[in-house]
Image (spheres, rainbow, N blue to C red):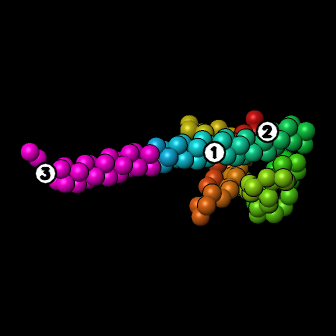
Amino acid sequence: MKNLKNVTGQMIIEVVIAFAVVAVALAGLVQIATRSTTNSGAAKRQAVATAHATKPLEFLEGEKEILGWEAFKATYNGNKCFDGVAIFNFASCAITGTEYTSTLGFTNSSTIPTGGGYPVEQITIVSQVTWREGSNTLKSVQTKVFTRY
C-alpha cells in the first residue's frame, strides 16, 4: 500500500506549479493587451501629428498664390510656428487645444540647372510637430519645396 502522505504532498506541489503556470500565462496576456492598446494610441497620435504638420504647408501654398513669389519670400522666412489657425514669428508654439507643438523652418535657395541657364529659386519649408509620450518627445516632420517658375 502506498504512503498517502507522500501522494498528498506531491499533489500539492503539482497544484502550486499549475497555478504558477496559469499566473504567468495571464500576466503575459495582460501585458500583450496593454502594449497593443498603447501602440494603437501612439499610432493615432502620430496620425494626428502628421495632419497637424501638413496643415500649415497647405495654408502656405494658398498664401504663395495670393501674395506672389516676392511678397511670399519676404513674409515667410527664418523660423515661425503655426498654432492651428495662423502663422506667427515664434520659433515654436502650441497648437491651440492640443498637446502638440509646431515649428516651421523656411530655407531659401537658388541653384543653376545642370547645363546652365537661369538660376532656379526655391523655398523649402520644414513643418515639425512634436508631442510628449511619457519621458519621450516624438515628432512628425513634413517638407514642401516651392519653386519659382
The residue that mark 1 highlights is 41
Quadrant including the N terminus:
top left
Outermost residue toward the front in this view = 1
Q: Mainly helix, strand or loop, the magenta region?
A: helix
Q: Residue at x 79, y 38 (%)?
A: 58
Q: In this image, 97 relative to 125: left or right?
A: right
- Tell me which numbered mark, 2 or 3, is placed earlier along the sequence: 3
Q: Secondary structure at mark 1?
A: helix
67 displayed left or right of 116: right
Q: Is residue 131 above or below residue 50?
A: below
Q: Secondary structure at mark 3?
A: loop
Question: Is residue 80 at all visible to an observer of this figure?
Answer: no
Q: Start and end of the magenta stretch?
A: 1-27
The residue beneath circle 2 is: 58
> How far is the residue under mark 1 from the one under mark 2?
26 Å
Of tags 2 and 3, which is closer to the observer? 3
- Give the number of marks: 3
In this view, the residue in front, 128 or 126, is 128
Hey, what amino acid is under mark 3? Asn
